[in-house]
Image: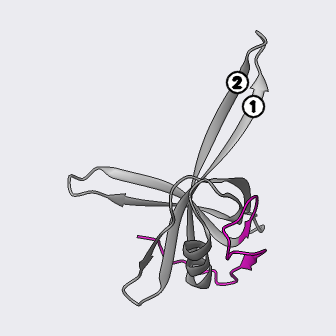
Amino acid sequence: MARGLNKVMVIGHVGREPEMRYTPSGRPVTSFSVATSRTWTSAEGERREETEWFNVVAWGTLAEICKTHLTKSQQVYVEGRLQTRGWEDDHGKKHFRTELVANEMILLGERRQHSGDFDFHDDDDSGDYAF
């Protein structure tokens, strides 16, 4: 079978404060959202804007770094892979969620006082799920 490629690179703004949890084994996982916007001019000459939201999940050391250094509205670069997971609720209804599983994060734009210039990379490619 031929090899495939699943790589996503997003530059946007953090949409909500990162939330860190721990798996039963004690492994940290942080989730947050990133909003990207694009603008264009319609055929009628109107300026339009569209925002796309990405659910981001970071694991291990990168999860801890994201929780410590990211804040809502901050500009960020996130690189990783897309992963869709599904589950069934108590009523038998199926749900699906597509997430960007981060393996790299770079702070962009204005930074908090103690953040400095950081480029974070996580080589751990676990198949664990966030929740």
Q: Is residue 81 left or right of residue 116?
A: left
- Spatial distance from mark 2 to mark 1, Cα to Cα? 5 Å
Q: Residue furthest bottom?
A: 25
Q: Is residue 28 above or below residue 90?
A: below
Mark 1, residue position: 39
Give the residue pinned by disc 2.
Answer: 48
118 inside magenta stretch: yes
Q: In this view, does 67 lie to the left or right of 114?
A: left
Residue 4 circle label: none
Q: Which residue is drawn at 44% across and 53% down?
A: 96
Q: Which amino acid does the dot numbered 2 rest on?
A: Arg
Picture colour scheme: one colour
**Residue neighbourhood size for the residue with mark 1, other residues' Cα within 10 Å, grouped as few (<14), some (14–19), many (≥20):** few
Mark 2 element type = strand
**Does the residue at mark 2 contact the one at mark 1 (Cβ under 8 Å)?**
yes
Residue 7 appears at what percent x and percent y? 73, 62
Q: Residue flagged by tag 1: what amino acid is it?
A: Thr
Taking 100 as reference, is 22 above or below it? below
Q: What stretch is highlighted in magenta?
A: 105-131
Helix, strand or loop under label 1: strand
> Residue 83, position in %: x, y?
57, 62
- Name the residue: 42% across, 59% down: 86
The answer to which of 50 and 4 lies nearer the viewer is: 50
Give the residue displayed 56% in from the left and 57% down from the top.
Answer: 72
**How would you rate the neighbour count of disc 2 (Cα within 10 Å): few for under 14, some for 14-19, many for 20 or more?**
few
